[in-house]
Image: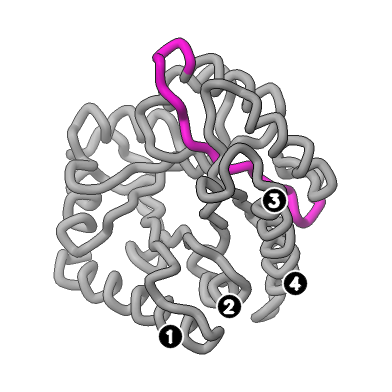
Amino acid sequence: MTEQQLRGNVLRVRERISEAAVRAGRRPEEVSLCAATKVQTSETIRAAIRAGISICGENRVQELTAHWEDHAYEGARVDFIGHLQRNKVKLVAGRVDLIHSAASEELLRTISQRAAALELVQDVLLEVNIGREDSKSGFLPEQTEEMAALAAELPGVRLRGLMCIPPIQTVPGGNRRFFSQMWKLYVDIRGKKYDNENDIDCLSMGMSQDFEEAVAEGATLVRVGTALFGPRPPLSVGAK
């Protein structure tokens, strides 16, 4: 993909976000675009930033580390949006702006401990298993309030909101009900005023196939990869 094509894709995705927001009676600026840069090269990431991407989301710690060392993220914020193992927290906490995938109590405590050791506070989202899938990590909806209260007590983390990856759907609009449930959870958590209500401002949901539905149901951040970069190339973290 050429840089010109990438610029066109970024523009089209932003237009689709704006149109979805307006249809839902929202302001387009309420929704942030996170470019899911999984398996992209450092040069592609740089080109995306030049094309206007301001948030890069990494799924794999190995790729995050390689691109970080290559200074690929300069000019943009970087989030971690993939599954995070506890033994990899030391490579992520303090390096990214926001961890979207705090998916267990043990992981939440490990992030807090690592951040506190670095004398910083790590922003996190609680990952919610909104579809109650055995194959996915995350808190069940009924566990979310308890975990939000715990996050407010931990010294090394700041709760910024919620994230979900709903079940794969075969029909258009199939995830709207899950996005709607997430919005209700998000509003409820904000209403509890854990620590500081103003800190809880992120509902991360929606990907290339369904981000417009997510925007319609209240997403404040969408994670888009294929619609920006096209089909994913083979993994090549060492590419410059």
Disc 1 marks which amino acid? Glu
Say which element carries label 2.
helix
| Residue occupied by mark 2 | 216
Say which element carries label 4.
helix
Residues packed near mark 4 inside 10 Å, few (<14), some (14 to 19) or many (20 plus)? some
Looking at the image, is mark 4 or mark 3 nearer the viewer?
A: 3
Residue 220, magenta (yes or no): no
Label 3 – label 1 distance at C-alpha: 28 Å
Question: Which percent across, then down, holds residue 34?
Answer: 39, 56
Residue found at x 73% / y 56% = 188
Which of marks 3 and 4 precedes in the sequence?
4
Which of marks 2 and 1 precedes in the sequence?
1
Disc 3 marks which amino acid? Ile
| Residue occupied by mark 4 | 177
Dot label at residue 5:
none
Question: Which percent across, then down, holds residue 229?
Answer: 33, 62
First to last magenta residue range: 116-132
Residue found at x 63% / y 42% = 126
| Residue occupied by mark 1 | 19
Circle 1/circle 2 CB separation < 8 Å: no
Q: Reply above or below: 42 against 85.
A: below
Question: Which percent across, then down, holds residue 214?
Answer: 58, 70
Disc 4 marks which amino acid? Arg
Q: Reply above or below: 136 against 22.
A: above
Label 3 – label 2 distance at C-alpha: 20 Å
Disc 2 marks which amino acid? Ala
Say which element carries label 1.
helix
Q: Quadrant of residue 230?
A: bottom left
Residue found at x 64% / y 31% = 151
Circle 3/circle 2 CB separation < 8 Å: no
Looking at the image, is mark 3 or mark 1 nearer the viewer?
A: 3
